[in-house]
Image: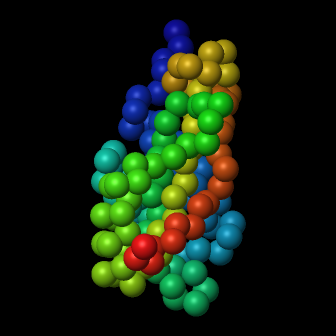
Amino acid sequence: MSKQLTKQEIHNLAMNIVGKDLEAKGYEFIAINSQLKKQPQFVCIDKNNQRYFVIVKATQISEHPITYDVVWMETFKNHARKNHAKVIFAGVGLGSKEDKTKAPILNREYLLQYDGLQLLDIELN
């Protein structure tokens, strides 16, 4: 019998996708937090020792770009500024290969919507 992934498993899969992208781009991990609704998921540095807070949003696959809550993100950007960090957002859409409106199935191929890492401007408006 096929089993749909749980919210935590979907979140972990999204984090693995983003983590591999960060590694491929040369980021070094300082901390990783895989708990749902705990931000950031990754704290990492680049080759110049610039600190980054990475927010991973796992969601259902969509025809539209994956976005974040703008009001909440302004609060998070303040936190990043206080810690001399930059913010990266990574939206990951996942869906079952058989029906994209459903969660991926354990040990089966899945659909992926990932536009890569999005560096957010943290300067005050």
Q: Residue furthest front?
A: 125
Residue at the spot x=59%, y=61% of the render? 118
* Colouring mode (rainbow / by chain / secondary structure / one colour): rainbow
Residue at the spot x=66%, y=15% of the render? 98
Q: Is residue 28 visible?
A: yes
Residue at the spot x=62%, y=16% of the render? 99
Q: Whole-percent x and y of residue 53?
A: 43, 69
Q: Residue furthest top?
A: 1
Residue at the spot x=33%, y=55% of the render? 72
| Corner quadrant of residue 83 | bottom left
| Corner quadrant of residue 105 | top right
114 relative position to 122: left or right: right
44 and 116: which is toward the camera: 116
Q: Whole-percent x and y of residue 16?
A: 55, 51
| Corner quadrant of residue 107 | top right
In the displayed structure, would residue 6 be above or below residue 28? above
86 relative position to 75: left or right: right
106 and 71: which is toward the camera: 71
Total marks shown come to 0
In the displayed structure, would residue 42 be above or below residue 28? above
Q: Whole-percent x and y of residue 60?
A: 53, 30
40 relative position to 23: left or right: left
In the displayed structure, would residue 22 be above or below residue 14? below
79 and 28: which is toward the camera: 79
Q: Whole-percent x and y of residue 12?
A: 46, 44
In the displayed structure, would residue 30 be above or below residue 62? below
Q: Is residue 107 visible?
A: no
Quadrant containing the C terminus is bottom left
